[in-house]
Structure formats: structure tokens, C-alpha cells
Image: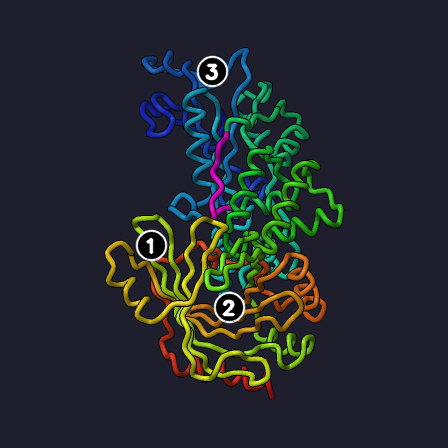
Amino acid sequence: MNSKISWYIQKKNKFLGDNILAICYNADEKETRDCGLTNDNILIFIKSNKLDDVLDEKNIKLENVLKQSFKNKKVFLRIQCECMLGMYGDLHCDCEEQRLRYLDFIRQNEGIFIHMPQEAQGYGIFYKLKELELQVGGRNQKGFFVGKKDRNDAFYEINHKKFTDSRKYYVIKNIFSELGIDNLSFILLTDSERKLKNLTSLGIDAQMYSTYVENNVTAENASEFLIKILDGSFNYDDNKIKEICDLIQNRAYNERTINTFLKIIEEIKNNKDIGLSKENQKLLLKTYDNIICGVEKTYNFVDQNVLKVQNKFSCKVDNKIFGITKMIFGKNIFSRIAFESNYLFQDLVNENDVKIRHSTVLDVNEKNSLFLKGQEYLQQTIIEEKTKFVENEITKSKLKSYFENRDYFYKTKIDMITFISENIMDGVNVYIKRLPNFDNHIMDVYGKKEKILKFIEEITKVSNRTMLDSISNVQLEDDKSINYNLSFSDENEAINEEVSIFKLLNK
């Protein structure tokens, strides 16, 4: 062995078990630069039962140990790119989950685990923190909110150029040559077609084996799966694609997840090849079709004794929405503006949720409003199932009774100021809300799917950037709730700001 290699036999290892050969390869300047290494030390762990045979020997030849370790067998190989934040608990990717699962697999099946210092696709931890703040917080390094980005858009925001993965793997070939194991056959533990092609192009005998991996898709890390699909660099099986679609359809996602999802939909609609099967493309398109207008829900209006079936579409919007709606639909589209408090209770006996909306009319459009300025009204919604709601008007005393009845558990209250358009626009009812702690207004549109799609098309024709998050946030769904109260820090100031907009709309 030359000076580029150092080694140590661990007799106990927390993750890999007893008797592990730990090797460090010191990459030279060219290897470090060309392969996108952020550190010149590459750590290799070798798990083989053959190590048991040499532990008691005073002198050993490492070359012979390595040659005997995997003689006449294919070797499981995992090349794990470094993710320091994941190792320290960040859940916005699944890197740490992958690392632990692959280590456990090597422990059980023997093989080679290589820790590659290629942090942030070779751009380093200094860059990674900037990127993640844009992804998760939507802020640049000056602290200004510029919108939440996916990985590729964050890269462009920082570097003003298209994202490229700077990682290369020819140093693996050099390591294997130094260790005398370059003639072995490997089973690569990965989902990455790119990584496999890179290794085989170097003359390394490798094939892919990824069916055992069960990395969980979560609301936090789903964007990482989707960005790899968008890049065409990973080939996930049908079950993984379905898992991602189920998460999105249940609205358990964040903005960067949905932004990446919409880019994938755009690529599919434009017939771009990103490595997805026809079946998976159909599944993604079906998911998009289901969520773009929400779930079709049946409402039973007790007071009117009628059933009503409608979809709900929600999105964040910027302040241009008011000018755009006035431009398209005329100045009298909002009949009233109201200050609303939504109370959510859990029916402990029937296991239903009960939502009560207490509204106070702040101002009205005299031409369209069926309500009077200053009028108060309360509406009770009983959520019997995920898609069935029973609604009727109630009194203030009825609201008070929920607080006093031990069969009901008070969960939360959300205050909001709402612009209301009911039975004015063609086939849709529109509600634009301002909520505490939200940077933008929220727009809810109710109606039949085709009517909602027509409404969205009209808006996006004028400005395709007004809708900041095209799919609703999970917190604002009818059958979901947040676990804390939301109230304005300065209620009067918030009301004055929104009422002034309402007056301008009807000027």
C-alpha cells in the first residue's frame, strides 16, 4: 500500500458490527477538484467475515486480506455522498435515513460502504446552508423573502446559472486499483441511474440493486425525491411514485414540494422524457387533476334541506389579485368583507369535528350584498366524514354551549379577514382571506371543477405569477386544523388595511 492509503481494523462498530476494516484514501488535488470533493479524505468501510481470520495475527498483509475478503462473490457496494445537516438531524432530505439503512444492509450482507465528501452535490456545506434557507424559509442571505425555491431554483438564485451536479466518480476506480480489488464484480446499492452509468463507463463491473430500500417519503423530504425525478437522474419503482402521489393528494406537502411537482407535470404535458413510465406519468397527471380543484365534497345544508356537491381550490396570492379580478370580472364582484373567527371543536361522542364560523360584516357592496354592514352571523359545519359536511346557521349562545359541554373538546381558533364573492361570478364562489402570520392572502374558490379551471385560466392569462402556490396549504383544508390559535397582533390595523382595499375595489 502506498502513502495514499491508511487503515485500521475496528473490533467493534456501532452500525456495522464486529471486525470492520476502516480505510482512508487521501485524494490528490486533481481528484478532489475533478470529482467535486469537498474534502480530500475518502472513508471506506469493509465488512467481511474473513477479517475474523486475521485478528490474532501479529503481522498481516492488507492486500491479501482484501483479496480473500470477497473471493468468488459479487460485492455489495454503497457510495454515500456526505450530508452533514442530515447527520445532525435535518429532516428536509432523506440522506441520513439512507445512510443508516445502507449501513444496516452492509452489516447483514457484507460489502463495502464508501463515504464520499461531496456535500451538496459537490458545492459544499457553505453553499448548502444558503440553498436550504431559500428552499425552506424562502429567504436570501440578506434576510429578504424572495419566495420558497426548489433545489434547482435556489441554485439559480445563488449562482445565476442552471443547476449542474458537479460530482464524478473516477476516484472510485483509483481507490479500487490501490486496494487491488478493481477486478471484483459489484452490486451497487442505489436508485441513481447516473451513478451506475458513471461507474460502468470507468470499466467497473457493476449492476444495480435497489429493491430492498424503503426510504420513507415525508412532507419534509418529498421535494428531494421529486427533484431527482425532474432531473431524470433517479429511477424509482412504481410503489415509490404512488407513495409520493398519495402524499400530494392528501395535501401533506410544503411549497417547494408542490413547486417541483408542478414542474414535473409541465414536463409530462410537454412530452419531455424524464425517465418516467407511461403508467407513472398517468398517475402523476391524475394526482394533479385531483388536487388542482381539491376533493369533490358533498354539503348537506340543513336549513335549506338540499345537497350540494362542489370542489375547493386554494392558493396563496399576491396583492395583484385584487386588481386582476376587478380588471377581468368588474368592480362589483365582492359583495362584502367580514372579520371571521373560526372555532374548531372535537365531538368526543360521535368522533366528528365541528367548525363554527363567527362573522362580523365590516363593509358591503350595497348592490350585491344580502347582508348589512355591522351584521353578525354564525354558521356551524359538522364534518361527518372526509367529504361530507352538514351546515346550518346557529346563535352565539349555541357557540357558548360548545365551550361548556364536556362532550366537546375545544381545539383551536383562527381569525381572518375575508373578501366574499357569492353567486356573482360564473359558477364559482371566491373568498380571499388575510390570516395572521401569513405573508400573503389566501384565495379559496368553490364550484364545479370545470368552472374553477375556467376561473384559474382567466387569472393566469393576465398574470401567471399572481398565484404563488398553486395548490392549497394543508393547514387551510376543511378537514385539517392547526394546533394553536391564530390572532392578529393589531386587529384594528389589519382590519383598516383590508377595508381600504375593499373600498378601492368598489370605487
Q: From the image, which quarter does the C terminus lie in?
A: bottom right
Q: Which residue is mark 1?
A: 346
Q: What secondary structure characterizes most of the magenta part?
A: loop
Contact flag, marks 3 and 2 (Cβ < 8 Å): no
- Number of callouts in the render? 3
Residue 69 is tagged as 3
Residue 158 in view of the camera: no
Q: Which residue is found at the position 31% from the left and 25% from the top?
A: 12
Q: Which residue is mark 2?
A: 145
Earlier-in-chain disc, 3 versus 2:
3
Earlier-in-chain disc, 1 versus 2:
2
Q: Is residue 61 magenta?
A: no
User: Which residue is at the far right?
Assistant: 271
Q: Which residue is found at the position 45% from the left and 20% from the top?
A: 110
Task: Judge whether 31 appears above or below 503 on screen.
Answer: above
Q: Secondary structure at mark 3?
A: helix
Q: Which residues are magenta?
A: 213-223
* Tag in front: 1 or 2: 1
Q: Which residue is found at the position 34% from the left and 65% from the top?
A: 485
Nearer to us in this view, 207 or 220 = 220
User: Which residue is at the far front?
Assistant: 305
